[in-house]
Amino acid sequence: MSRYDEDLVAPRTLTDLEQRALLRASGEHRDGFRDHLIFSLALGTALREHEIVGLDIGDVFDEAGRARRRVQLRVFKRSNRDRSQQQILLNETVRAKLEKFRAWKRGSGESLDPAAPLFVSRKGSRLSTRQVRRLVHVWQERAGADVTHNFHTLRHTSCTNYYRLKPDPRAVQKFSRHASLRMVARYTHPSDEDHARTIQGLRC
């Protein structure tokens, strides 16, 4: 298979059930709220793991402590050199969770300085991509998953979900911040779940 063909293969994604289970398992525990928000951000914005851990307080909150609707990324994939395209929009669900998380950070004594990292480890340092990769496996196991998927699967899931809601490749390209429209073609492939859902709707 050529590299071109590989780019067009449908990416692995979480099913709707797996997404709900992951969010529910992490959201049910106070100690899991940080991780729950990380997963919500990934599913709601298609951010990559290094983009999420690179976020600072000032990136996502304004001076009044309100979650921003539009976030300008400072850390993003190096191949995407156009900084003007490195913006994400936050929906109301994610913004509400962010504001709740900010209150949680204040109550836990974590810094709310604009230059402080949004996500910190138990030792108080910026959360690492390695830790994030481990967390997604831990919470999938806690959610009862038979097979766990890597963190980048959340990005693929987010882009696929977006395409389901708005089947416009150029809109998906803007959402995912892919430099190449060709890369977006992967998200137009129906998943096994889509296929099974359609079959159930056939008249027979």
Image (cartoon, rainbow, N blue to C red):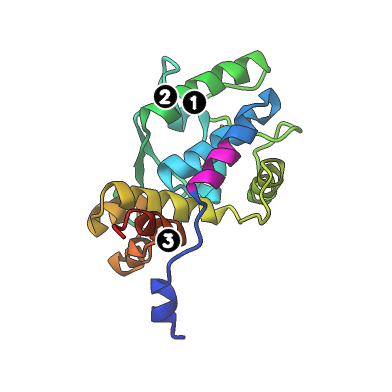
Q: Position of residue 103 (x, y in %)?
A: 56, 16
* Quadrant of the frame with the C terminus: bottom left
**Residue type, numbered disc 3:** Ser
* Residue beneath disc 3: 191
In three-dimensional space, the C-alpha distance between marks 3 and 2, rounded to whole angstroms, equals: 33 Å
Q: Which mark is residue 67?
A: 2
Does 18 lie within the magenta span?
yes
Q: Residue at x 46, y 47 (%)?
A: 47
Q: Residue at x 38, y 66 (%)?
A: 186
The disc, 2 or 1, on the residue closer to the chain's N-terminal end is 2
Q: Of all residues shown, which one is farthest toward the right?
A: 123
* Residue beneath disc 1: 98
Region rendered in magenta: 16-23
In the drawing, does residue 186 fall left or right of residue 39? left
Whether label 2 touches label 1, CB < 8 Å? yes
The disc, 3 or 1, on the residue closer to the chain's N-terminal end is 1
